[in-house]
């Protein structure tokens, strides 16, 4: 073993050893992962180039293939790929220790997001730099080869790491202290499985009574606290856990001073006081420095100074979050645009726009899933949740999933409109965003019914942009028509919101009604309008997966106001109003029943249904609605049966639309 030497400052110092080498190796592991991925990416690119050459020339000889790889454009694109992939893999934290130490799926998901981002950036770069030799065949083959190779490489490296974890020795841990805290830490380490790779070598005693300590703690006593440096060297310790009583701060400070310069990682167990101090902020009072802890009453000016940077940061983060989707669609544009140069024969056929729309729908579903899960959990952690009142457990469920749906739908709809040059999409997008904001505000402010109607009326007035641009009536009638549309808008969005409150109802009804309207508009010669409705149905289809019984995410008012908003905008655009009233038939019937029994009121003004014996019963203070009338006629029902009834009712109205319109 090496010997301890003393520096001029009196600190212990250990000569270089394998422990330091292990630390250095551990720190460069992410860079080794990155290097391996970049090398494999270059290899997969060259293989794709060779595949393109062999496909077009029917010459599979190795010499000809090597000659084909010597072109200057291949070198230039190879350097470009190297830069893009290095940036993207680092940006998405593919090599973070948390992902590598966790389960396989988060690591593969991060790798997949990074590859989508990388190929989107590559498509844009190829388009702008006019690399005409980079064909669609090469792009697709490179995408497939690179994805398969990198995924297999990460799975293989994870398997190799699992094997090495079983072969390599565990980290050697020394616990300083012999009290109850030290005993608890040792018991936890000894109970964990072999993947933790931590082994308690022994203890350093902070007491003179050593009788029975080794038997109680399950490991030998290697000396007292003062002998820590020598014990570290003698037993090749890699981690020192200080488990001394927290009132022994002077002794802890002396021990840390003695261990300075030694290879082991020093670890402390924090108490509540340590956590308060760590959360404190250094401030001046007069000329004296103090550590401020706790919260004080917010000053309006100070609160504003914090909110503005937070808002800027939130907007920036949202733009960054959407950027992979934008870049991916740009890549799709590249793939579906006619290219000059190398392979004219591998261009996509005339149905490429339909193929591109199908890909956009898939991207919409994936993007909705990602935003829905991440943003809903973010809001839940900040107290935005609802109580599932129709279950005995009254679970807390993440709420306002409609915000995520708005982000996903508006993003893909905007790109769809950009690709197909739909100028009429702007008012629909604007009203969708604004009505979602109204619903989100209602979640926190509990807006009165008349207030919500007024807000909805103001949002509906935005459709005057579609009407004034090409008026069909004289000025007075045009103004009256705009006011009528605004009135229909605010009434329709709010009545759609009334038929809610059960797992899977709103999302399922939206999928059914959007699908029916998409078929109707397609049959009547509006394929682009039908495309918008398909995007809406896909978005809410993903939501239905999380919202169905038992619900894991609630839509909230931000999500229940959106569908009717889109339907009305498309009715204004096409002039087809009758289908709108058919698909909203159950909602208007529900609103009429409620208005006749209660007038204009809020759901919070009345008692919810009572849960008893697995079924929902009518309360004593009741009002009438479609669902409550169904329970009155059919008797107490399970929540799933109520949802099924509403979905069947919506299907019936949609079928009537096709029969009578």
Image (cartoon, rainbow, N blue to C red):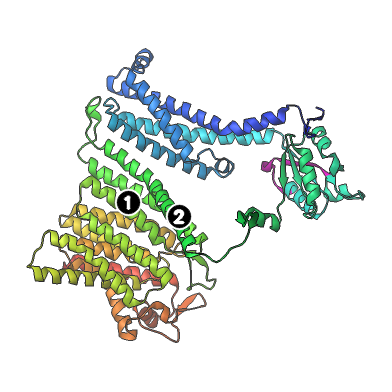
The answer to whether residue 495 is visible is no
Residue 112: give its label. Answer: none
Q: Name the residue under label 2.
A: 310
Q: Name the residue under label 1.
A: 411
Of residues 352 and 17, the one drawn nearer to the viewer in this rendering: 17
Q: Which residue is drawn at 34% across and 73% down?
A: 498
Left or right of residue 1, residue 195 in this image:
left
Q: Where does the N terminus fall, quadrant-wise?
A: top right
First to last magenta residue range: 191-203
Percent across and percent down for residue 646 are: 34, 71
Q: Crowding at label 2, few (<14), some or many (≥20) Cα neighbours within 10 Å?
A: few
Q: Residue at x 15, y 55 (%)?
A: 525
Circles 2, 1 touching at the beta carbon (< 8 Å): no
Task: Note whether 465 is above or below 447 in the view shown.
Answer: above
Left or right of residue 140, residue 185 in this image:
right
Q: Residue at x 69, y 58 (%)?
A: 272
Magenta residue check for 200: yes
* Mark 2 → mark 1, Cα distance in angstroms: 22 Å
Of residues 152 and 68, the one drawn nearer to the viewer in this rendering: 68
Percent across and percent down for residue 482 are: 17, 68
Q: Residue at x 31, y 35 (%)?
A: 124
Which numbered disc, 2 or 1, marks the residue that appears first in the sequence? 2
Q: Crowding at label 1, few (<14), some or many (≥20) Cα neighbours within 10 Å?
A: some
Indicate the secondary structure of the residue bearing disc 2: helix
When asked about the image quadrant of residue 20, the answer is: top right
Task: Note whether 649 is above or below 623 in the view shown.
Answer: above
Magenta residue check for 110: no
Q: Residue furthest front?
A: 287
Percent across and percent down for residue 179 are: 82, 53
Of residues 281 and 129, the one drawn nearer to the viewer in this rendering: 281
């Amino acid at each position: 073993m090496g010997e301890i030497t003393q520096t001029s400052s009196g600190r212990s110092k250990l000569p270089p050893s394998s422990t330091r080498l292990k630390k250095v190796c551990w720190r460069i592991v992410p860079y080794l992962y990155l290097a391996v991925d970049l090398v494999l990416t270059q290899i997969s690119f060259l293989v794709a180039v060779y595949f393109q050459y062999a496909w077009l020339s029917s010459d599979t000889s190795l010499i000809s293939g090597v000659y084909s790889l010597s072109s200057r454009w291949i070198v230039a694109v190879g350097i470009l790929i190297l830069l893009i992939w290095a940036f993207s893999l680092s940006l998405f934290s593919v090599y973070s220790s948390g992902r590598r130490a966790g389960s396989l799926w988060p690591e593969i998901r991060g790798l997949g997001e990074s590859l989508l981002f990388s190929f989107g950036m590559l498509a844009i770069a190829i388009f702008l730099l006019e690399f005409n030799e980079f064909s669609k065949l090469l792009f697709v083959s490179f995408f497939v080869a690179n994805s398969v190779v990198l995924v297999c490489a990460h799975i293989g490296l994870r398997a190799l790491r699992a094997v090495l974890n079983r072969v390599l020795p565990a980290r050697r841990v020394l616990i300083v202290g012999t009290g109850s805290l030290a005993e608890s830490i040792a018991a936890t380490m000894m109970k964990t499985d072999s993947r933790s790779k931590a082994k308690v070598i022994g203890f350093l005693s902070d007491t003179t009574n050593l009788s029975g300590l080794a038997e109680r703690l399950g490991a030998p006593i290697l000396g007292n606290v003062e002998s820590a440096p020598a014990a570290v060297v003698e037993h090749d310790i890699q981690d020192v856990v200080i488990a001394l009583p927290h009132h022994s701060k002077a002794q802890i400070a002396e021990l840390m001073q003695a261990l300075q310069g030694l290879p082991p990682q020093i670890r402390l167990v924090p108490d509540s006081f340590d956590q308060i101090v760590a959360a404190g902020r250094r401030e001046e009072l007069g000329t004296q420095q103090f550590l401020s802890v706790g919260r004080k009453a917010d000053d309006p000016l100070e609160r504003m100074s914090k909110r503005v940077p937070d808002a800027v940061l939130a907007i920036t983060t949202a733009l960054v979050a959407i950027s992979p989707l934008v870049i991916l669609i740009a890549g799709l544009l590249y793939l579906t645009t006619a290219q000059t140069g190398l392979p004219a024969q591998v261009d996509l056929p005339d149905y490429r726009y339909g193929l591109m729309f199908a890909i956009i729908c898939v991207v919409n579903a994936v993007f909705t899933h990602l935003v829905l899960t991440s943003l809903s959990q973010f809001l839940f952690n900040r107290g935005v949740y609802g109580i599932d009142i129709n279950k005995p457990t009254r679970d807390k469920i993440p709420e306002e999933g409609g915000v995520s749906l708005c982000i996903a739908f508006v993003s893909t709809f905007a790109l769809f409109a950009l690709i197909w040059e739909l100028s009429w999409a702007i008012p629909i997008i604007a009203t969708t965003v604004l009505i979602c904001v109204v619903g989100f505000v209602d979640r926190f402010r509990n807006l009165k019914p008349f207030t919500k109607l007024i807000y909805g009326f103001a949002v509906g007035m935005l459709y005057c942009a579609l009407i004034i641009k090409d008026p069909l009536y004289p000025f007075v009638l045009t103004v009256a028509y705009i006011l009528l549309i605004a009135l229909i808008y605010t009434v329709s969005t709010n009545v759609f919101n009334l038929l809610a409150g059960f797992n899977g109802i709103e999302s399922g009804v939206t999928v059914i009604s959007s699908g029916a309207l998409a078929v109707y508009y397609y049959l009547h010669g509006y394929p682009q309008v039908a495309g918008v409705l398909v995007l809406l149905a896909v978005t809410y289809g993903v939501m239905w997966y999380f919202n169905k019984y038992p619900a894991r995410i609630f839509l909230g008012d931000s999500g229940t106001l959106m569908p009717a908003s889109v339907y009305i905008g498309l009715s204004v655009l096409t002039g087809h109003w009758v289908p709108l009233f058919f698909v909203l038939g159950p909602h208007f019937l529900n609103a009429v029943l409620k208005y006749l029994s209660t007038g204009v009121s809020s759901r919070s003004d009345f008692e919810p249904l009572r849960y008893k014996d697995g079924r929902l019963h009518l309360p004593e203070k009741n009002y009438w609605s479609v669902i409550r009338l169904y329970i009155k006629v059919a008797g107490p029902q399970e929540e799933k049966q109520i949802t099924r009834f509403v979905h069947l009712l919506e299907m019936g109205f949609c079928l009537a639309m096709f029969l009578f319109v």
